[in-house]
């Protein structure tokens, strides 16, 4: 009877809540009231169930109700919220909650009543098979084909599909987690990680540095670990762990070079997890543990600039974080620039300039496409307006490559010495904070572009708020690609003459790609038995 009464009471609260806001307006791709309530720490307790492809868990958020709000509003997407409890003056009680209307991009708000003295809210929930951040792989989809695999991808706004939280890059929190997985598998997160499997299948994690929600991550699989250097190592399925370690031999040198450029590495260890083939990105900069596609394991160490990129995010993105997805170029443009500087330090200027020239080529193609379309021209600005759109729309060569070439232009305008000093201070002053385009430009004007001449030459407003790329932008000259161009030019004297001229041992994957992309169309003739086949091979572009 008491139970029925209690249920009726809570039902009535749910049905007729005294004050939850009726319609919740989203701001910066989040329903959460992050300007009123601060989340300081997240404690996760997760049970990863492969049979049903579900995670059952509890997310406990330690909060500070600074704005004296009557509710805390969290983001969810494709989650089943089962129970909510809150801790008020040291007393834990079951709480009512309600869910807002579903938005196809943003998901649903989870509204929980709180008081001035609520210090924790705890949400018991489970993910549904449609939880977009989670990829459940069958054994056949892995390298070793013996065990299933799970990995998450939270950026940009998918953390809410496996954890109820305030899903905004403008706020940071520390976290700890206890994760239970099948005994044959090991769990890894963007935190302190185990290096060996244990027989209980229970793993504990701590991330003591505050991170934005999009950097929460989890991977579960039959993986092993190999140390690479002082604070670097690699995780991969055991069947190719050795090849991965060989390919990533330069990882420690990269970390050391990055530190020499822009200041100390803030995250303790830098490890990399090589994922099974279906990983939908090249890489993801999850703190302490970069996630990377196995396609970088090329056998010739030619694709490791991806590691330089994800490592660079340990400063640009993870340490100094874009406050909104409209300022996404601050994460990616800075990272591509920094990646190039790491590559230059480890592999020399010729190699790094070749990568820059290839990037410039990609940018020109993207610009041609976007500028031809009246509706998409505005997307060639560095600072975007993504309100009402999926923030993933901002993931284009504009943020990455136009961003990089803007910073390169600043370097060329001010000189490398002053520019590097400014950038190092930028990472130091804004460490563990979020940043916006305006904030960056203010700092730039105050600390680096200190004369009217420099300001005029830097022309930052055109670069940031204007479409396309200024016509005066200095082209990239790559001696390596010039060499390939010279080989290509030999085709005038015949296909065989051209091929004979190439020294394959001096070509990397990047040389070959440039070669193939610029091969003129030609006719291939093959004789099979009595039959002659002819085929026109078009230029790949
Ligand atoms: N942070 C990005 C991946 C990302 C961006 C995921 C936006 C979701 C939304 C990561 O650092 C990245 O840029 N990866 C690139 C590879 C890189 C070498 C350019 C990728 O996966 O293509
Ligand atoms: Zn990136």
Image (cartoon, rainbow, N blue to C red):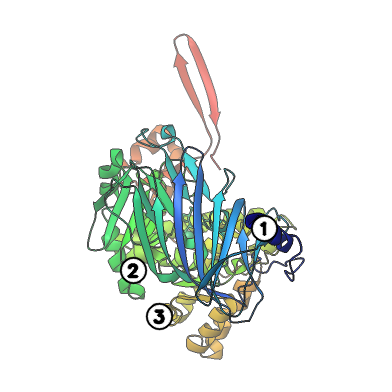
Label 2 sits on residue: 258
The alpha-carbon separation of the residues under discs 2 and 1 comes to 40 Å
| Percent coordinates x, y for residue 114 in the rendering | 62, 73
How many other residues sit within 10 Å of disc 3, few (<14), some (14-19) or many (≥20)? Answer: some
- Residue 306: which quarter of the image? bottom left
Q: Is residue 518 visible?
A: no
Q: Is residue 301 above or below residue 112?
A: above
Residue at 54%, 39% in the rendered image: 539
| Percent coordinates x, y for residue 434 in the rendering | 52, 75
| Mark 1, secondary structure of its residue | strand
| Mark 2, secondary structure of its residue | helix
Total count of labels: 3
| Percent coordinates x, y for residue 503 in the rendering | 31, 42
Label 1 sits on residue: 108
How many other residues sit within 10 Å of disc 1, few (<14), some (14-19) or many (≥20)? Answer: many
Marks 1 and 3, the one that precedes in the sequence: 1
Q: Is residue 390 above or below residue 385?
A: above
Label 3 sits on residue: 428
Q: Is residue 253 above or below residue 259?
A: above
Question: Looking at the image, is mark 3 or mark 2 nearer the viewer?
Answer: 3
The alpha-carbon separation of the residues under discs 3 and 2 comes to 14 Å
Q: Quadrant of the N terminus?
A: bottom right
């Amino acid at each position: 009877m008491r139970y029925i009464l209690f249920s009726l009471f809570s039902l009535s609260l749910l049905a007729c809540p005294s004050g939850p806001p009726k319609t919740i307006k989203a701001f910066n791709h989040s329903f959460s009231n992050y300007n009123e309530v601060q989340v300081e720490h997240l404690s996760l307790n997760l049970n990863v169930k492969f049979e049903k492809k579900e995670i059952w868990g509890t997310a406990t958020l330690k909060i500070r109700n600074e704005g004296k709000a009557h509710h805390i509003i969290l983001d969810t997407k494709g989650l089943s919220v089962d129970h909510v409890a809150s801790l008020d003056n040291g007393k834990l009680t079951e709480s009512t909650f309600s869910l807002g209307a579903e938005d196809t991009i943003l998901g649903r708000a989870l509204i929980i009543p709180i008081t001035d003295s609520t210090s924790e809210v705890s949400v018991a929930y489970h993910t549904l098979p449609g939880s977009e951040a989670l990829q459940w792989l069958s054994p056949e989809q892995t390298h070793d084909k013996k065990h299933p695999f799970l990995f998450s991808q939270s950026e940009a706004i998918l953390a809410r599909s496996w954890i109820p939280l305030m899903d905004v890059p403008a706020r940071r929190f520390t976290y700890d987690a206890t994760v239970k997985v099948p005994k044959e598998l090991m769990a890894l997160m963007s935190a302190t990680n185990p290096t060996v499997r244990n027989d209980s299948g229970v793993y504990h994690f701590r991330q003591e540095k505050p991170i934005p929600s999009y950097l929460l991550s989890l991977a579960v699989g039959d993986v092993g670990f190999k140390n690479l250097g002082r604070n670097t190592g690699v995780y991969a399925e055991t069947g190719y762990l050795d090849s991965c370690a060989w390919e990533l031999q330069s990882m420690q040198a990269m970390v050391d070079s990055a530190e020499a450029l822009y200041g100390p590495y803030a995250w303790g260890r830098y490890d990399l997890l090589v994922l099974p083939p279906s990983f939908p990105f090249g890489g993801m900069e999850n703190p302490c543990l970069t996630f990377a596609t196995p396609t970088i394991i090329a056998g010739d160490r030619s694709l490791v600039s991806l590691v330089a990129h994800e490592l660079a995010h340990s400063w640009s993105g993870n340490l100094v974080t874009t406050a909104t997805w409209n300022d996404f170029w601050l994460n990616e443009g800075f990272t591509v620039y920094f990646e190039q500087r790491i590559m230059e330090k480890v592999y020399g200027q010729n190699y790094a300039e070749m990568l820059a020239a290839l990037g410039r080529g990609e940018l020109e193609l993207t610009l041609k496409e976007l500028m031809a379309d009246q509706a998409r021209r505005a997307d060639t600005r560095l600072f975007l307006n993504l309100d009402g759109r999926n923030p993933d729309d901002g993931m284009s060569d504009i943020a990455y490559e136009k961003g990089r070439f803007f910073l390169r232009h600043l370097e060329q305008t001010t000189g490398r010495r002053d520019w590097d000093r400014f950038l190092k201070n930028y990472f130091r002053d804004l460490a563990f904070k979020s940043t916006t385009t305006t904030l960056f430009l203010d700092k730039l004007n105050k600390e680096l572009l200190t004369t009217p001449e420099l300001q005029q030459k830097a022309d930052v407003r055109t670069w940031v708020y204007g479409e396309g790329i200024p016509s005066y932008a200095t082209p990239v000259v790559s001696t390596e690609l010039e060499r390939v161009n010279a080989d290509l030019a030999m085709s005038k004297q015949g296909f065989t003459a051209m091929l004979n001229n190439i020294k394959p041992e001096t070509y990397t994957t990047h040389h070959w790609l440039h070669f193939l992309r610029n091969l003129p169309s030609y006719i291939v003739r093959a004789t099979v038995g009595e039959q002659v086949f002819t085929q026109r091979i078009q230029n790949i572009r």
